[in-house]
């Protein structure tokens, strides 16, 4: 079988993968990146469409009756499709403990420690707080709902530059405005000599030497043996090949990295029992309402896809933040049976009632969502050769959290005179889920950082216990819910892990000198 | 009534479940998986009235009447109105003729006329409700057909530029005017802020 040799292999190309690829390449390491999904050139490949064929070619999911996780598989990972809201996790996030009172985060990692890395991440992505005059109409209406109740509501920071407000952030920005990784980390790393193979999936990992742990003190990269073998497959041709690497950085995302390590458990026998476990769902709860006549109109379709505002009003007391959202019609139709609550009439998710509601959708409907500090209680399991299932324990506490949070969202609507909508999430057969159903794109922690192997998969620098040189740098390493959107924290933590790898390894080769192109000279 | 034999096929269900691409956006949580696998059950047709598989025009009329029942106000002669039902990307395509024949059977049963498209709107709605009250497989078939109608029409999936005028969805666009996107006096409406830069400490 064909074998490729490299010093560093980075699996994935999203927020967790991009910083190590860039920093290690710039520090002189020979770095290869593989990405399961297709190559993606924004201006060539993105479309303003709601065609499921287009969306489903990039967006994937795993779930069951209790939960649904969504993620992207393409060059740049979730960055191509995210809504660019870029928030730092509040300090309290790092103080969460488990049922035994143990800190969920490894000792010494807190907001202050992450702040310099947040700075770097924000600079790379041009993150700036949205100006008051740029807040989309639906964000203004959400803020007004909060203001009317005497609550605070803050303008959110965004990774965007030169937005024309087309409203299609989640199908991909055609205007070079959204700061996806295709505009910063990835081209910069490529310019520095990073090699990228797209349509290439890492299938499993095995060791090439009997005792990888014996290499833990070898920090001079040329002296480190090729210690890990990764079996890969070209996803278009089906051809398999091997990659031998000295350092392996996993950035396949919370689900992708868990799957890869679960597939490797038999070969990496010391991985421990936490792989795939302790996934935090970030407490995602939604509600929708119709603003009363005479209220300023929102607009689901104009301006950027995220409405621009976040409220921390309930963060200290309840551990939740509240934002609003602007789903496109496909999203709202395909996700839920929405019906108007109350009035005793026949409120159906189809027919005239539904049409009347959909007619109000653009200008009078407001969708709120809360993110919160729910415990890491979801899991993904391997059920067969490359087959997986997810699981969430709907504990009484979690049910209570859901009900309480939903009640807060409803009360914001009701006290403003809005009509609350019933939301019944539907399954893949179009039927309503029988019970509470959590859905999120902010799942984190399937291979969490921890102080000890008893409690996690990787140490505080993302290095897998007992497997020196394998690092988890993506959402999988983040050990707790964040109560805010996840990308910036994943990016900052990946910068921290990359800085650690660079600072603890010696490499004599210098990075290639970057030639200034003619275009730049002009 | 058509005679149906319903074969449970766990294997095909399982395969569909694990290969289906359920996609779920943050707030919206799109369970579009139905588009990738409408029913776990294989339906084997016996004595299935050939009329519906042979007469494409009749089938089309019935499907158009179905969509306009589910979405009153949808334009009956819209070229894309029922395209999704014949789109081979979606497995529903394989059940479409059967679905039409079931609509006909229920119409005949309830109102003595098997041409669903000739019924009044109220009668057609009653037929749809009757299907939704059917056994598990029939319910799924009707759920799937409603879902596909709504996805296709509201989201305008076959015409990116057109969107869905019924709900004022403009489809693809390359930027709005400032006054469309923003309130010029937005500061009047904005609540006070708890942070200096949007990040809570
Ligand atoms: C529609 C949407 C909107 C969002 N909006 C926001 C937002 O506004 N703000 C925010 O903060 N967050 C947002 N998120 C969440 C954010 O995008 C994710 O938290 C983030 O992308 C996770 O980063 P990651 O590096 O862990 O994984 P990802 O970005 O998912 O990257 C993982 C990559 O690894 C690849 N991969 C997986 N397994 C393998 C393998 N075995 N071999 C090779 N490659 C592999 C995948 O194809 C993927 O490209 C959104 C997400 C979605 C889907
Ligand atoms: S709203 Fe702005 S950032 Fe989003 S796709 Fe349009 S131009 Fe790009």
Image (tube, coloured by chain):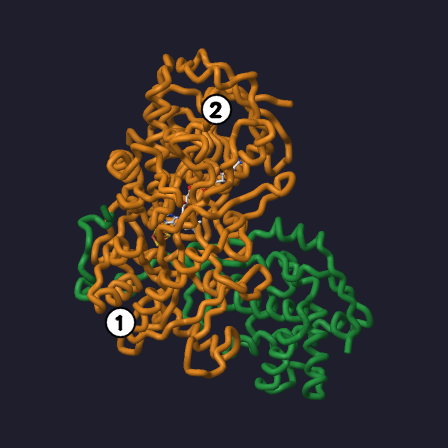
Chain colours: A orange, B green
Task: Say whether residue A81 is visible.
Answer: no
* Mark 2: secondary structure: loop
- Dot 2, how many residues are within 10 Å of its Cα: few (below 14), some (14-19), or many (20+)? many
Looking at the image, the residue that sits furthest to the right is B47
Coordinates of residue A460 in the picture (x, y in percent): 37, 31
Q: Mark 2 — residue?
A: A466
Q: Quadrant of residue A384?
A: top right
Above or below: residue B134 compared with residue A496:
below
Residue at 24% x, 52% y: name it: A130
Distance between mark 2 and mark 1 Cα atoms:
59 Å
In the picture, which quadrant includes the N terminus of chain A? Answer: top right
Q: Nearer the viewer, residue A147 or B103?
A: A147
Q: Quadrant of residue A315?
A: bottom left
Ligand 1 neighbours mark 2 (CB distance < 8 Å)? no
Above or below: residue B52 compared with residue B30:
below
Q: Are marks 2 and 1 in contact (CB under 8 Å)?
A: no
Q: Can you tell which mark lies on residue A296?
A: 1
- Dot 1, how many residues are within 10 Å of its Cα: few (below 14), some (14-19), or many (20+)? some
In the picture, which quadrant includes the C terminus of chain A? Answer: top left
Coordinates of residue A159 in the picture (x, y in percent): 31, 45
Residue A142 left/right relative to A353: left
Q: Nearer the viewer, mark 2 or mark 1?
A: 2
Q: Nearer the viewer, residue A486 or A393?
A: A393
Q: Nearer the viewer, residue A478 or A190?
A: A478
Q: Read off the chain for label 2.
A: A
Coordinates of residue A469 in the picture (x, y in percent): 45, 23
Task: Say whether residue A405 is visible.
Answer: yes
Q: Can you tell which mark lies on residue A205?
A: none
State whether discs 2 and 1 lie on one chain.
yes
Residue at 42% x, 53% y: name it: A170
The tag earlier along the polypeptide, 2 or 1, is: 1
Residue at 27% x, 77% y: name it: A294
């Amino acid at each position: 079988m064909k074998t490729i040799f490299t010093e560093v292999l980075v699996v994935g190309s999203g927020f967790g993968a991009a910083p190590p690829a860039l920093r290690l390449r710039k520090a002189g390491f020979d770095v290869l990146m593989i990405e399961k999904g297709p190559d993606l050139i924004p201006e060539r490949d993105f479309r303003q469409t709601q065609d499921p064929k287009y969306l489903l070619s990039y967006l994937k999911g795993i779930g069951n009756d209790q939960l649904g996780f969504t993620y992207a598989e393409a060059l740049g990972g979730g960055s191509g499709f995210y809504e660019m809201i870029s928030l730092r996790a509040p300090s309290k996030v790092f103080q969460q403990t488990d049922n035994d009172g143990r800190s969920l985060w490894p000792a010494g990692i807190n907001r202050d420690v992450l702040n310099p890395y947040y700075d770097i991440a924000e600079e790379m992505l041009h993150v700036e707080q949205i100006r008051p005059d740029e807040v989309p109409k639906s964000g203004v209406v959400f803020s007004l709902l909060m203001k009317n109740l005497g609550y605070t509501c803050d303008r959110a920071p965004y990774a965007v530059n030169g937005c024309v407000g087309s409203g299609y952030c989640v199908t991909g920005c055609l205007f070079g405005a959204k700061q996806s990784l295709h505009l910063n980390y990835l081209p910069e790393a490529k310019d520095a000599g990073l090699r990228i193979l797209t349509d290439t999936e890492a299938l499993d990992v095995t060791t090439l030497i009997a005792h990888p742990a014996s290499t833990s003190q070898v920090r001079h990269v040329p002296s480190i043996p090729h210690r890990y073998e990764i079996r890969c497959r070209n996803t278009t041709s089906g051809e398999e090949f091997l990659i031998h690497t000295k350092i392996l950085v996993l950035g396949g995302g919370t689900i992708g990295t868990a799957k890869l390590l679960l597939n490797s458990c038999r070969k990496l026998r010391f991985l421990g029992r936490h792989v795939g476990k302790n996934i935090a769902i970030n407490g995602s709860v939604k509600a929708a309402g119709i603003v009363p006549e005479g209220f300023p109109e929102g607009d689901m379709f104009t301006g950027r896809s995220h409405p621009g505002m976040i409220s921390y009003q309930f963060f200290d007391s309840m551990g939740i933040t509240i934002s609003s959202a602007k789903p496109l019609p496909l999203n709202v139709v395909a996700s839920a049976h929405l019906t108007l609550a109350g009035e005793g009439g026949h409120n159906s998710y189809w027919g005239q009632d539904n049409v009347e509601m959909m007619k109000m959708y653009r200008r009078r409907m407001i969708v709120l969502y809360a993110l919160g500090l729910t415990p890491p209680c979801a899991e993904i399991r391997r059920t067969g050769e490359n087959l997986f299932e997810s699981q969430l324990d709907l504990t009484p506490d979690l049910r209570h959290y859901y009900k309480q949070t939903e009640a807060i969202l409803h009360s914001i609507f009701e006290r403003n005179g809005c009509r609350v909508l019933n939301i019944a999430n539907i399954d893949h057969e179009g039927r309503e889920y029988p019970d509470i159903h959590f859905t999120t794109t902010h799942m984190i922690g399937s291979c969490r950082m921890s102080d000890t192997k008893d409690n996690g998969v990787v140490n505080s620098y993302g290095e897998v216990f007992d497997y020196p040189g394998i690092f988890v740098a993506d959402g999988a390493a983040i050990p707790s819910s964040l109560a805010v959107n996840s990308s910036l924290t994943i990016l900052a933590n990946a910068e921290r892990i990359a800085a650690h790898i660079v600072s603890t390894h010696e490499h004599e080769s210098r990075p290639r000198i970057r030639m200034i192109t003619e275009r730049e000279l002009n | 009534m058509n005679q149906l034999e319903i074969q449970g096929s766990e294997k095909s269900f399982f395969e569909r479940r694990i290969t289906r691409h359920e996609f779920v956006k943050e707030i919206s949580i799109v369970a579009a998986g139905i588009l990738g696998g409408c029913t776990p059950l294989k339906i084997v047709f016996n004595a299935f009235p050939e009329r519906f598989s042979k007469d494409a025009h009749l089938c089309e009329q019935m499907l158009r009447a179905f969509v306009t029942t589910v979405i009153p106000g949808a334009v009956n002669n819209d070229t894309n109105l029922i395209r999704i039902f014949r789109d081979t990307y979606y497995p529903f395509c394989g059940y479409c003729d059967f679905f039409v024949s079931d609509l006909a059977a229920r119409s005949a049963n309830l109102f003595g006329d098997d041409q669903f498209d000739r019924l009044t709107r109220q009668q057609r709605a009653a037929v749809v409700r009757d299907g939704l009250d059917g056994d598990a497989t029939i319910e799924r078939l009707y759920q799937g057909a409603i879902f596909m109608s709504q996805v296709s029409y509201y989201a305008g999936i076959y015409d990116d530029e057109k969107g869905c005028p019924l709900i004022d969805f403009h489809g693809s666009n390359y930027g709005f005017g400032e006054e469309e996107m923003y309130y010029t006096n937005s500061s009047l409406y904005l609540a006070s802020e708890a942070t200096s830069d949007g990040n809570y400490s």
